[in-house]
Every structure is written in structure tokens, then in C-alpha cells.
Amino acid sequence: MDMVAMEDCVGYLAPQGFLPELLHELGPVATNLGRLVLRTGAMVQPAWVRNIWCNPRVIPFTSITQAASALKMLGPRWALYDEHLPRRGRARLIQQQLRGPSSRPLVFGDPPPPMPLGSWTLLDDTTLLASPRCTSPFAHGEALFAEDRSGPPSRAYLKLWEAFTLLNRRPEPGQLCLDLGSSPGGWTWVLHKLGVRVISVDKAPLDTRLGGLPGITFRAESAFAQDPQAFGPVDWLFSDVVCYPERLLAMVRRWLDAGTVRNMLCTIKFQGETDFQIIDQFRAIPGSRVLHLTHNKHELTWIWGKNSGDRIQ
């Protein structure tokens, strides 16, 4: 691709291991630098993307100092993307002269970094590709947390931490939350920490660490057998259950039809090949968004809000 033409593109950084999924979503593309895909046209919001470079610019330079100065003039903080480069020394010398992203893992409850974080790379030894504005405040879109290694019964809790952090919204103390397919209880543990009332449902038991904690009601039942009308108004419904996406969609639609829940956050887990048709069906539900979190594997997170003030931007 002509370097000048790159300035008419938007850059989409795929999650590690999911470049084919991103390419499928984007359709015909201009070029890609490793898992950074450059596509002409207006910015879109694919599910299989880690970070979006909103306005890449091509910048020629003659020295490392000049390159760093050019980046500093565009923005205060920069993250170097260099995994596709055969030689990385020159790029890293430039990055050393820049203010980079924070290396401190995020503590849950802290907001995302407020300062913009640009992304850049080298096209060759004398040309930068830099985007001062990106959709994620985290380096390469990866939200990393200081983990609790003793409290939660599984690392699945990190998905919920990340989702609440990106939303900048979470259940409030005293609200009613359902955790469907909850065993061993990673998400129930997070919700308990937030001070909500949790009805935790699974045929398999919760981890013994959660037994007897106030605010948790456990039901040894199927997540899919729950009657939405039996609970009354529900503030949040959560599900990280292992099931085929079609079965999750049917359950979600049943709750939508009942009209008793205000917010839902569920994991779409793929068995074998990625089902793009089912992704489109989730995405087509008004008020929802589908995204790939840092802590997702071969799965996506679907988030929905009933009221306009709750909907995902």
C-alpha cells in the first residue's frame, strides 16, 4: 500500500490469535502489519478487535530524536507496537524518549487512565505510522489487573472486573443480580464484593469459600430452567455458562421478552469454529454491544442495557 494512502485508513488491532476473525469481520482490507489491520473507509466497531487506531499518520524522520519529537508534538503518551518488525532496536530507542503507558496493573475500582494513549510503529527505518487517538486507554487495548490470588475461586472473575472498568458502571449495593451458570463462583464472588444481592444458579456447587457469605442465595438448578417472571424486577443478569451460543441466545431472548431485567452481561463461548451469524444476532439486539475482552479466550462478551442511560456506547 502507498504510504500516503495509509492516512486514509483506520487501524484495527486484533487480539492475539484472532486475526482471522477480525479479517472476516472487516472484509476487504488495504493491508496488515502483523495483527494491525489497515482498512479504508469510516471507522467500524468489530467484535474481534483489541484497539482501534482512529487517525493514523505517516511521518518521515531522519533521526531517533526527530522521530520522538514528532510524536511528542502529537500526544503526551505513546505505546509502541513492534511485534511485526524484523528488527526492533531502532523503534525501542525512539520509545525510550517517550512517555509510555503505565506499567502498574490496574487495581479494581480504579477508573481507566484518563490521559490519552497513542499508538505507533515503524513502516521502515525512516517512517513512522502513528495514531494519537485510539479507542483504548490501555497499551494495545490490554487491561491488566493486580490479581487477587486467594479470594476468588477462578480467574473468570477478571472478565467481570474488566467489563465493569470499561463500562465505568457496575451494580450498586443492594441491587438484585442473577448469576446463571455460576459454578465455581468467580462472578458471584465479584458481585458479593460489590455489596449486591446475588442469586447464584448452577447444578454444580459453589466453591466452599463462598458458603455462608451474606447476600448470596444459591440455587442448585439449571441456568436455563429459570422463569424470568419468578424473580420480579432484576437489575443485572450475568452468565458465564459453558454452552453453545444458540442456547445462550435463546435464554437471552426469553429474558428480553419477559421485560423484567434492566442489564445483561453474558459470555458467548464458541465450540470449534467461530459462528459469525450468531454474533450478528446478538449484535442486532437494540441496546447491546459485543466485544472481546483482554481476559476472553475463544469467546466474546455481550452487554445489553434496557434504558437509554444504561446502553453501551
Image (tube, grey):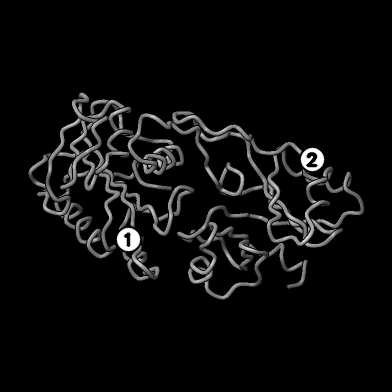
What residue sits 88% from the left and 54% below the top? 61
The amino acid sitting under disc 1 is: Phe
User: What's the amino acid at mark 2?
Assistant: Gln
Q: Which residue is mark 1?
A: 282
* Left or right of 40 in this view: 18: left
Secondary structure under tag 1 reads helix
Q: Can you tell which mark lies on residue 96?
A: 2
Q: Residue furthest bottom?
A: 28
Please state if 212 lies on the left or on the right of 312 as rendered.
left
Instruction: Measure the alpha-carbon separation of dots 1 and 2.
Output: 43 Å
Comes first in the chain, label 1 or label 2:
2
Q: How many marks?
A: 2
Residue 201 x %, y %: 17, 43
Give the quarter of the image for residue 242: bottom left
Query: From the viewer's perspective, is 99 left or right of 279?
Result: right
Query: Which of the image's four quarters has the N terminus?
Result: bottom right
Q: Position of residue 313 (x, y in %)?
A: 43, 48
